Image (tube, rainbow, N blue to C red):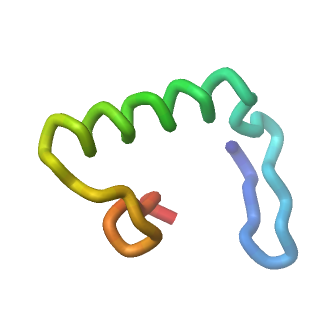
């Protein structure tokens, strides 16, 4: 996401594509299952 900006939002020159979002969701879900973490807005966060 080179050149991305939060406000006003701009996804940058290389935005994250749908396939990558799907893969990240699967990885997060697997980590929640492995470590017995209930996925909520408070327990699963991005670095953003």
Left or right: residue 47 compared with residue 17: left
Vertical relation: 18 (above or below) 37 = above
The residue depicted at 29 percent of the width and 58 percent of the height is: 38
Q: Kindly identify the residue that appears in the image at 67 percent across and 21 percent down.
A: 19
The residue drawn where x is 76% and y is 39% is 15
| Residue 9 image position (x, y, % from top left) | 83, 67
- Is residue 41 shown left or right of residue 14? left
State the residue in front, 44 or 17: 44
Residue 42, image quadrant: bottom left
Q: Pinpoint residue 8: horizontal percent, then vertical percent.
A: 86, 75
In the image, residue 33 sits, relative to residue 23, either above or below, namely: below
Quadrant where the N terminus is found in the figure: top right
Question: Residue at (46%, 70%) from the top-left corner?
Answer: 41
Of 38 and 13, the residue lying toward us: 38
Residue 2 falls in image quadrant: top right
Could you say where residue 36 lies in the image, as x and y percent from the top left? 15, 48
Q: Where's residue 6, x and y in %?
A: 73, 71
Left-right relation of 10 to 35: right
Count of numbered labels shown in the rendering:
0
Q: Nearer the viewer, residue 20 or 14?
A: 20
Relative to 33, say whether 37 is above or below: below
**Residue lying furthest left:** 35
């Amino acid at each position: 996401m080179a050149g991305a900006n939060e406000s006003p939002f701009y996804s940058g020159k290389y935005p994250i594509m749908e396939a990558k979002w799907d893969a990240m969701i699967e990885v997060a879900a697997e980590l929640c299952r492995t470590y017995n973490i209930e996925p909520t807005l408070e327990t699963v966060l991005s670095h953003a």
